[in-house]
Image (spheres, rainbow, N blue to C red):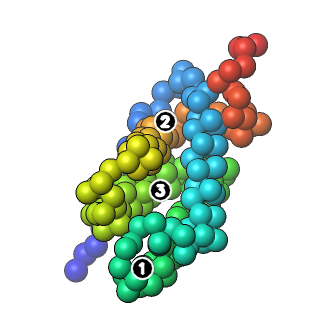
Amino acid sequence: MNQKQLLSADELEALLSGPAHVDVNPDKFFPLRLWIVGIAGVIWFIRLTVFTDEVANSLFADPLVREYMKTALYFRAWIMFAFMFMGFIAYKTGKYPALFFLGMFIVGSVNLIADMTIFYKDQFANPTIGFNLLLMFRFFMCYLLFVSIRNANRIPSGRDKWNPFLAFQKKS
């Protein structure tokens, strides 16, 4: 069986991040988006690893399901951390950032859909403002990752890459 590679990683990166033009300006909001996603991810990671019991108690009424799902929540936190770490390394090195942001987007979207069908089943029966804000926040995080995929060819260079206030600085 002849298994010829149809698409290289470089070609996939170019397809995901859009066409590279010579005169393209850096995306000044890219570092801000990265910091928002990073801080939200660290808070979520701490919430799922340190406060696993409280999260499980708030999600599941049945004690048997609650005990079973604690390990799933803990495991999910470490998977999320691993993808975020790889995404930040890709961002730092400039090696295939669109691919890693795509991975983070897929994991985040699949987790959101799984949460809506498994974890949030009871909350959909009696939605609260806090629950609605949580869903909006999670959709917003997925949107930020999608925009990061599309603008991966416009990542600022040098020290500007990590400056969350780059968008608010005057052009010199």
90 displayed left or right of 140? right
Secondary structure at badge 3 equals helix
Q: Nearer the viewer, residue 17 or 116?
A: 116
Label disc, if present, on residue 104 of the rendered structure:
3
What residue is pinned by disc 1? Answer: 66
Where does residue 14 sit, x and y in percent of width and height? 43, 43
Three-letter code, disc 3: Met
Chain-order first, disc 2 or disc 1: 1
Which label sits on residue 151?
2
Locate residue 163: give its quadrant: top right
**Residue at the spot 55% in from the left edge and 33% down from the top edge:** 154
Few, some or many residues within 10 Å of mark 3 (<14, 14–19, 20+): many
The residue positioned farthest toward the left in the image shown: 1
Q: Quadrant of the N terminus?
A: bottom left
Q: Nearer the viewer, mark 2 or mark 1?
A: 1
Residue 8, picture quadrant: bottom left
Q: Position of residue 10 (x, y in %)?
A: 46, 51
For the residues marked 1 and 3, what is the alpha-carbon distance in whole angstroms?
27 Å
- Crowding near pointer 1: few (<14 within 10 Å), some, many (20+)? some
Distance from Cα at disc 2 to Cα at disc 1:
40 Å
| x 64%, y 49%: residue | 39
